[in-house]
């Protein structure tokens, strides 16, 4: 029991930088500009319902795309890709060593109207081909400042957080369990459906948590790739604290509601994960 | 006349450059309890995996009921396996673990007269068969437990039920009792043999435990270094081992260099003994096997040979006595106590000798010098210098 003193530095850190700010957020959320108690911060929030909806929607799309790309990759690496495992893990990790903002900036220059991708399309004559066929007059594809660009940015940045937990879980599945399933008459598809998928569900759940939560609250990606045209929760909150619309009370209220929604989502999801029927649900 | 069910013909298996199986030839009869017995790394598990379809031999044929099945995947074979450490599905409860194979199965639809349409088993049928298995393994009432809430013995029985419920023609068992404690293992040995007779199918059993093999098998296949050393009934293997490896691996054996003077006469220690073996060339060098329980201790004058007791261990049912005969140490099992240092004589009946041709294993087994060394150190009663102990292969 003496060893619990080892945790003291962290506990202090947590208290000062997590617990206290959280309490402040809660206090601010119920405070009006003149310092009194109020619920008006929550009632004004109704104006931003669209932003809430959009944020959760885009985060959901990004999470789904991450699962669709990440699961097969993680499966392949864990079960088959002996030879290229190190290489692939390296390639997945590599972008994470670079600063998040830099990565997103680079996507800007790729997706811009005069950016790398459009220049490339022009060089290979894609636009003149399309113009020739459809009689249009386009010189670029509009990619930047769209919701699609935001989802792309999220997937790009958060994909490793989906791949790694799934990979870890699948890799730990005892090959004898898979052989046992084959032995009992399950073909490849059935082995996956009845054994691997349910056993890898915990990995998928933590992957979802690790992608969905930061995706909901991100503000740099919509700022850079959405060009301020597509406002998300992160931008909204940031604007209340730093921007022109300075109103930390409203900002705190929005943060609080967002945290609550995320917590509820996670709780519901984990309930599915624990239940016996978890495999069937997904 | 028993019917042949499985045949391995000239099967070789190599992983990278390592030869794991050398030209294995083996047939397994229907309804037989056959045990693949050998030390770890002898190729017994690989042989089992070839029969189960989890590995394909590098060369050679696997025949099932006369049909070559080398390329048939495990899920299409009428063979089920009980895996080492059970490999139960951790996310499914006992009922669903046992029902797994049944849910994969499709049978001809009784409503379709042409018999071509295949349907899944009905829930009622699955439930009936799973419950039947639960009765056989006496785990009624445990249906809803997850595997990790079961004891080792219970998991073991679920693993057996999970395989048997599919009514396979052959059940493969890969060291299924290895993780259980001694008492439970003994019970399960009897249980398994009973189940095998009850369901009347072929069991192919892999173990490194010779006692287990002797207790349960109809046929034992002794393997070492990827080759079959001997195939036979438990009695054959014990009484007529083919070489020093088999003699040593199955039970305890004193193996002494000898010369076969003529039919029924073997010479060792410069003395002639009468035995019952024949069919060797005149004066052919041989290995002589004498089982520890076939040796009678008599007074020094009456004995065919005389030696000095160097060690006595009480084993409950008998004493294990190590006797030095001119530098070569024998193990004798007897109910009579002889003190350390005593001069004793031994008498061996003619049928107590078993003569084997010389083999690559000659000289590697059957000397109990190092056995006695160990005990000398423990009991601190070392009175004489022991000859440097040969490897007697009794680590297990």
Image (tube, coloured by chain):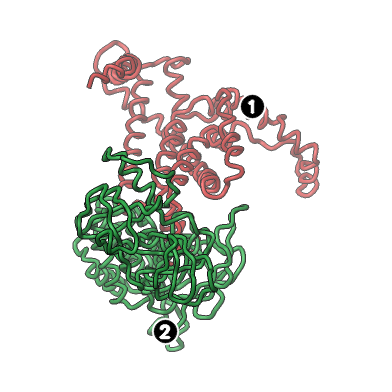
x, y (%) of residue B139?
22, 63
Is A53 left, or right, of A224 in this rendering? left
According to the colouring, which chain is red?
Answer: A
Density class for disc 2 (Cα within 10 Å; few <14, some 14-19, many ≥20) is: few
Q: Secondary structure at mark 1?
A: helix
Closer to the camera in the image, A259 or B263 = B263
Image height of B106 relative to B158, above or below: below
* Mark pair 2, 1: CA separation: 76 Å
Residue in the image at 31% along x and 40% along y: B383
- Chain of the residue displaying label 2: B
- Chain of the residue displaying label 1: A
Density class for disc 1 (Cα within 10 Å; few <14, some 14-19, many ≥20) is: few
x, y (%) of residue B235?
35, 73
Name the quarter where the N terminus of chain A is drawn: top left
> Which residue is identified by label 2?
B2
Q: Secondary structure at mark 2?
A: loop
Image height of B188 relative to A57, above or below: below
Q: Residue A281, can we see it?
A: no
Is B76 left, or right, of B202 in this rendering? right
Closer to the camera in the image, B252 or B297 = B297
Is A82 left, or right, of A258 in this rendering? right
Label for residue B340?
none
According to the colouring, which chain is green?
Answer: B
Closer to the camera in the image, A138 or B248 = B248
Query: For residue B265, which quarter of the picture?
Result: bottom left
> Which residue is identified by label 1?
A106
Residue farthest top in this picture: A34
């Amino acid at each position: 029991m003496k060893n619990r003193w080892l945790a003291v530095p962290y506990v202090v850190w947590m208290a000062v930088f997590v617990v206290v700010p959280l309490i402040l957020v809660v206090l601010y959320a119920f405070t009006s500009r003149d310092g009194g108690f109020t619920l008006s911060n929550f009632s004004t929030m109704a104006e931003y319902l669209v932003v809430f909806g959009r944020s959760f929607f885009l985060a959901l799309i990004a999470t789904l795309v991450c699962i669709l790309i990440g699961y097969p990759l993680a499966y392949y690496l864990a079960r088959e890709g002996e030879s290229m495992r190190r290489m692939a893990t390296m390639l997945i990790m590599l972008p994470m060593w670079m600063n998040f903002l830099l990565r997103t900036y680079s996507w800007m220059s790729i997706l811009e109207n005069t950016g790398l991708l459009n220049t490339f399309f022009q060089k290979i004559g894609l636009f003149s081909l399309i113009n020739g066929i459809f009689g249009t007059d386009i010189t670029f594809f509009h990619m930047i400042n769209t919701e699609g660009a935001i989802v792309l940015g999220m997937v790009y940045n958060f994909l490793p957080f989906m791949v790694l937990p799934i990979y870890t879980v699948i890799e730990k599945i005892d090959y004898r369990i898979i052989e046992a399933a084959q032995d009992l008459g399950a073909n490849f598809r059935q082995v996956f459906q009845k054994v691997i998928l349910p056993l890898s569900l915990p990995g998928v759940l933590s992957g979802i948590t690790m992608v969905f939560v930061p995706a909901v609250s991100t503000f740099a990606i919509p700022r850079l790739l959405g060009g301020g045209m597509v406002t998300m929760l992160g931008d909204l909150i940031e604007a209340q604290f730093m921007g022109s619309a300075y109103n930390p009370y409203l900002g705190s209220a929005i943060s609080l509601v967002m945290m609550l929604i995320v917590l509820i989502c996670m709780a519901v999801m984990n309930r599915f994960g624990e239940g016996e029927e978890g495999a069937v649900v997904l | 006349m028993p019917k042949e069910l499985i045949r391995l013909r000239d099967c070789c298996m190599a992983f990278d450059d390592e030869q794991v199986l050398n030209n294995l030839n083996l047939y397994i009869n229907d309804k037989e309890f056959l045990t693949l017995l050998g030390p770890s790394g002898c190729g017994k598990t690989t042989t089992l995996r070839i029969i189960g379809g989890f590995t394909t031999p590098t060369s050679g044929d696997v025949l099932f009921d006369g049909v070559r099945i080398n390329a048939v995947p495990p899920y299409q074979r009428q063979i089920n396996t009980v895996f080492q450490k059970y490999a139960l599905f951790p996310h499914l409860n006992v009922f669903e673990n046992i029902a797994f194979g049944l849910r994969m199965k499709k049978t001809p639809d009784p409503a379709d007269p042409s018999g071509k349409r295949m349907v899944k088993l009905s829930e009622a049928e699955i439930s009936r068969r799973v419950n039947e298995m639960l009765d056989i393994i006496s785990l009624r009432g445990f249906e809803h437990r997850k595997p990790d809430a079961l004891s080792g013995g219970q998991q073991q029985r679920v693993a057996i039920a999970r395989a048997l419920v599919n009514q396979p023609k052959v059940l493969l068992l890969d060291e299924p009792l290895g993780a259980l404690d001694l008492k439970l293992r003994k019970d399960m040995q009897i249980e398994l043999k009973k189940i095998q007779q009850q369901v009347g199918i072929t069991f192919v059993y892999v173990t490194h435990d010779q006692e287990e093999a002797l207790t349960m098998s109809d046929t034992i296949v002794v393997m070492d270094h990827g080759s079959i050393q001997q195939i036979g009934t438990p009695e054959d293997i014990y009484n007529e081992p083919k070489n020093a490896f088999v003699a040593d691996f199955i039970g305890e054996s004193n193996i002494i260099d000898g010369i076969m003077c003529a039919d029924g006469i073997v010479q060792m220690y410069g003395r002639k003994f009468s035995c019952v073996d024949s069919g060797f060339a005149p004066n052919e060098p041989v290995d002589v096997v004498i089982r520890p329980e076939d040796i009678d201790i008599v007074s020094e004058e009456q004995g065919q040979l005389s030696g000095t007791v160097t060690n006595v261990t009480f084993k409950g049912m008998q004493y294990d006595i190590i006797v030095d005969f001119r530098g070569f140490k024998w193990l004798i099992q007897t109910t009579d106590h002889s003190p350390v240092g005593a001069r004793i004589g031994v008498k061996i009946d003619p049928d107590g000798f078993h003569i084997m041709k010389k083999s690559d294993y000659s000289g590697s087994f059957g000397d109990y010098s190092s056995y006695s060394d160990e005990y000398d150190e423990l009991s601190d009663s070392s009175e004489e210098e022991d000859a440097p102990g040969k490897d007697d292969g009794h680590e297990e």
